[in-house]
Image (cartoon, grey):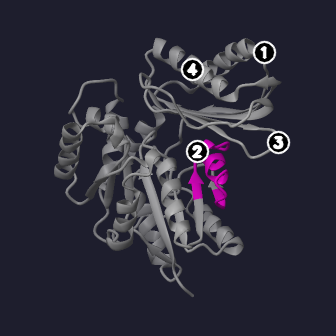
Amino acid sequence: MSQAQYIMVGGFLGAGKTTAILRLAELFRDEGKKVGLITNDQSVGLVDTAMLASHDFPVEEITGGCFCCRFNSLTDAAEKLSSAERPDIFLAEPVGSCTDLTATVSYPLRRMYGNEFQIAPFSVLVDPVRAERILGLAEGKSFSPKVIYIYMKQLEEADIILVNKTDLFDAERLTTLVETLQSRFPQARVITAAARHGLGIEEWKQCISTMPASQGESMEVDYDIYAEGESLLGWVNATVSLSGTNWDGNNFLAAYLTEVQTRLSGSGIEIAHLKMTLSPSEGHDLGVMNLVRTESQGELSHALQEPLDSGELIVNLRAEADPEVLMNVVTEALETIAVQYGIQSSIQHAEAFRPGRPVPTHRDARG
């Protein structure tokens, strides 16, 4: 039995992991390889799953905790994909607020399922603006120290650090960031990409295919600080039915995102990631909006091709704030924009919570 390659792509919320994974999956598919995707979240109703599935990739979604705490669900998801598609490549995207994934996922997979999976080097993506601020290279709104602890631990365990969204920086600024990351995290190879434009993905793929995965000592992690850092983040997942007459879904998404952004900014809340999809009740069209910092510009990464009469809106909001405050913002902003567009809205599912303490199923000291 041939080994499937298991590629895990981590990074903090808003780093652009889903877009990068999609580009990487398309490169593998162009080579004639079968690709299975595994998404992950603390709860149900993921924008990422909807977006990846819209590109005709088989996707399994693991909810209720990160891969480290849902290890058996991870292997079950791989088995389901194998039964249906027999992928050559598994691309797995863990929760963006999780760390210690080498010790709790990669090493146990190698130990228990080494005959089935070839474990690829662990890639961690970074948003360059966020990285600049956290590394002290630029001023700007950031997170509390315990949240930053998680961010830095993600970089500490990376085999590959992929600086994404390089189109946001000039050459000098990018060089300074890359050199700082390479100096601070010498165990990793630092490379660059602009996933939304498909730039740098081929080099990333080559690194994944040729570099060895880490097999050394697991890094030290203070799980008390880790748990407290995660608990500072509020999570909102909502699924909403929308109906009206011949309305512009792209304009609706942009207006709704701006309304949420304005309300959060007015409360001094820093967004880690706000993402939403809108799909018509019939057909396979999809609109996707993203916002990765409170003061940044929203991006329509996938545009709807036709007006809608009815559809489903999925909203995922992650921010350092009380989850009930975030839920109120999401629902009140929806009411405001729905009235402006003459649309009826009905919330089908909504959850607001803080992530619980991470309790890994396994943790191996060495690979």
Q: Quadrant of residue 363?
A: bottom left
Read off the residue under disc 3: 282
Residue shown at the point (82%, 42%) measured from the top left: 282
At which x and y percent is residue 311? 78, 34
Cα distance between the residues tagged 1 and 4: 18 Å
Q: Which mark is residue 42?
A: 2
At which x and y percent is residue 166? 33, 42
Q: Is residue 268 left or right of residue 34?
A: left
Callout 4: helix, strand or loop?
helix
Mark 4 or 2, closer to the camera:
4
Cα distance between the residues tagged 3 and 1: 20 Å
Cα distance between the residues tagged 4 and 2: 22 Å
Cα distance between the residues tagged 3 and 4: 27 Å
- The residue type indicated by label 1 comes to Gly
Name the N-terminal-most of marks 2 and 1: 2
- The residue type indicated by label 3 comes to Glu
Name the N-terminal-most of marks 3 and 4: 4
Highlighted magenta segment, given as a residue range: 38-60
At which x and y percent is residue 338? 73, 17
